[in-house]
Image (tube, rainbow, N blue to C red):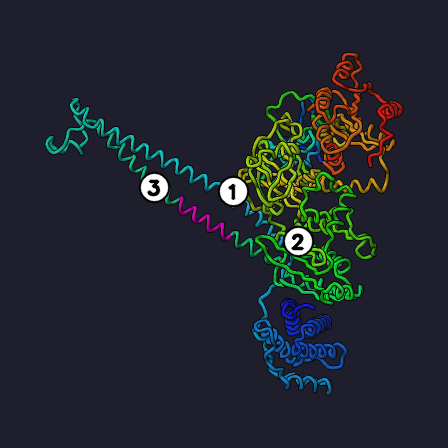
Amino acid sequence: MSEEIRKENEKSYCVFGIGEREFLLPKESVVQILDITRIFPIPGAPEYIVGALPVRGKIIPAVDLAKVYNVERLSYSDNKLLVIEVKGERIGILSDITPFFVSFEPDFVVEDFIDPEKLFEKLKIDSQKSNEKGNAK
Amino acid sequence: MLSNSELIKYFLIEAEDYLNTLIEGVEELESRDFNKDTVEALFRATHTLKGSASIVKLDKITTLSHKLEDFFEALLNDQIEYNASFLYYVKKVINAIVNLVNEVAETGQEKSEIDNDLIKTIDAIFVTKQLPSPEIIAEPFEILPVVNTVRIDLGLVENIITSLGEILVQKNTIADKERELVDIIEEISNSGKRLLKEINDFSEIYWFTSQEKGQKVLDSFFTDFSDLQFDRYEEYHIVLRKIQEITNDITEGIKTLANFSENLSFLFKSIGREINYLKDSLIEVRMIPAGKLLQRLAEAAKDIAESLGKLVDIEIKGAEIKLDKPIFDGLYEPIIHIIRNALQHGIELPEERIKKGKEKVGHIKIAVYKEGKNVNIRIKDDGKGIDIDKVKEIALEKGLISEERLPYISKEEMLSYIFAPGFSTSEEVDFQSGRGMGLNIVKTAISKLKGTIEVFSEIDKETDFVIKIPQSLSVSNLLVFRSSNLEYAIPLNYVEEVLSVDDFPELLKDRSFTHKNRNIPIKIFSEIFYPMNGKNITGGYVIILNFSGIRKGLVVEDIIGHEETTIHSFGKFLEGLRQYLGYYIASKGNPRYVVDPLKIFEEEFMFAAAKDRILETVLYLGSVLVVDDSISVRKALQNTLETKKIRVYTARDGYEALDILEKKAVDLIITDLEMPGMHGYELINRLRSDSRFKDLPIVVLTSRGTKKHEEKAISLGADGYIVKPFDDQTISNILSKFDITKNTIY
């Protein structure tokens, strides 16, 4: 990838997979790709937050988009955690494949593109949701 | 009035600041020549110094500062021309003040006399408006600094404290590793000893047995001796001997290793001590003496008393105790609120006090003192006290407590209900403290500082508020426990005691127990945090938490210990997890979630507030519990029902539904059949077999339209069966069928 001569204005994406589907994220928001050693569940968190991965004294919440987009997951083995940074915070996204990078011409319309900020807003646990949960208790 | 010695302490802290400003200003004038801004700053500093000194009646300092002030003023008004000799006199006066301040710090009094010649010279300058020619030798500042101080940006200290927090975590990791090392060495040393013993035993038994079997030894060590001088050895013996030697070497090695690790442990321990020391001193760097706060409070209290026509003597104690900056900033409001209450509702008018046989002048005592890792603030007045019967009456009326629980509530616990939201014993409305006493605001403010507040009172004698606050907010003391293979922590300042569940056999069944004459309700941690997990807890520990005098018990499976650490916040993405205060990473690398005890027992505290709102806005006609795993169904039903003035509770499955039924009065249940956790059939079955709920109307709302499902639901005890989707009319029909809208529950 890095050996290819890239055209100036190409846009780069990171591709990751859930089940048989693939999604794209802007390359700039990707921080690192981690092997999942052990995820610690966070009781009280919504189902799509499968847990927390401790990394250097902090935790990174691990999000399973299969539960968000209703995708059938094939196997749980060999998961990677794609860590992205949105609004100054790190969030991990489970990927069934080892994520890789691709580039397209800027006018190429990519499908299954995920806007990290929108994802953040959609998935963050706000007090509204927790109130809803609080009522349910 | 404040006692003079307390005030002097406060003055000294302040004087140090002003004198530093003065010295810095003069030094600036010296190096950069005349500068109006600097002179203005000097003028302001001397003015304030004069004011403060006069309050504490330090007359000499007052006189000298006054002179200095006039001097600067004259310069600012261009009455005198600035030249280098000006600073000579300024320095002389400053030195005299420093001298006096030092005397006051040591003895509490001004000892030396004012240098009258100096005063006269200065006065002469005022008259002649002429400074002496600048040939006078420069006067050095006396090396008599009041206290050695450096001014430093608070942000810098914050940074250091943050990294120190990280170091503390690392220190805990090292401590754990060190324990592991000791274990490993012990294991090796035991194995070594066993090896040595085995070899010795072995050689003792076999040493002589194989001697006769031919095969001479060729090793020169042995062959150099004649047969008479030495036993005949075979290769076998040599190997044996060599193994013995090696084993001895290993044993020696292990001994050395053990010594080494002992030394290392010792070093770890001393570095640990140093880090703790460093932490304590660093935290102190950021701290501000309580004196400044007490002074402000006392001044404000005097003004309030005056406006109310009450005579009061305010005593302050503990001006020297230091407080963390955020705590210092956060304490004024809640304390002044308490004082305002004490003055308004506590301290009687002079005539009334005389009638009661009390002193004409009321007393308010504000004391700050240290207790372990906490700073306590006590505000005590000798006024009316709190009428406990009135408190009981209001608590009952507002539904804060039920009639049944009344006999179990101790006097002190009853008093603590004055902190409940919406509570007020005073009928008066006054514009300053708002409606009634509003002590809930005080409690909220104190909670924000991770503190607790308790009240003690004796009618017509005194009211005593005790605020307990951790001395530092950046490092938290936590009690660590385990539940379902995860580790949690809870702030130690809420924890009063930890008891074994085994000592109270009825505790789990009764959901409460009696300890030290108090009936303490309990909650089981795993039930709240793992509602889906139906596993029953059988043993464990009950952590007794003290919420401003109200005690609650939290049952956990296992206690791990105590830890001092820095808590990280969950960040924006997870901020909705309000049951946690944050987390930290334990030395083994696993996260520990820090639980907010207030949130666990929230319903009990918030109940009153919620109910209060209901009283003000609408009267509900009935209450319905909606059980459905789909949020859209829950919301739709909730909307429909709420427009019909129905109080709606929602649950995602049978377990949550049962949980709600334990706490809330419900007139009707509308439940789905298929749900994760506990499904609808199971829920109906459980409710029908519980005598309390056997007549509670249950309506099934499902997408399963087949007769088979309906028959099964009805046979289990459902009273109605609706197939989704539903409309407004369907719901109205159900409500009228079960007479829900005719009830009035609030």
| Residue type for callout 1 | Thr
| B337 in relation to A63, above or below | below
| B373 in relation to B19, above or below | above
| Residue type for callout 2 | Ile
| Residue type for callout 3 | Lys
Q: Name the disc covering residue B467, or none.
A: 2
Q: Are marks 1 and 3 on the same chain?
A: yes
> Which mark sits nearer the N-terminus, 1 or 3?
1
- The CA distance from mark 3 to mark 2 is 54 Å
Q: Name the disc covering residue B173, or none.
A: 1
Residue B213: quarter of image: top left
Q: From the top left corner, tell me how far across and down residue B321 is, in percent.
A: 61, 60
Q: Element at badge 2? A: strand
Q: Looking at the image, how many numbered discs can be counted on the residues?
A: 3
- Numbered range of the magenta stretch: B261-274
Q: Quadrant of the N terminus of chain B?
A: bottom right
Residue at image mark 3: B255
Q: Element at badge 1? A: helix
How crowded pointer 2 is (Cα within 10 Å; few <14, some 14-19, many 20+) is rated as many
Residue B595 visible in the current orientation = yes
Q: Is residue B273 magenta?
A: yes
- The CA distance from mark 1 to mark 3 is 26 Å
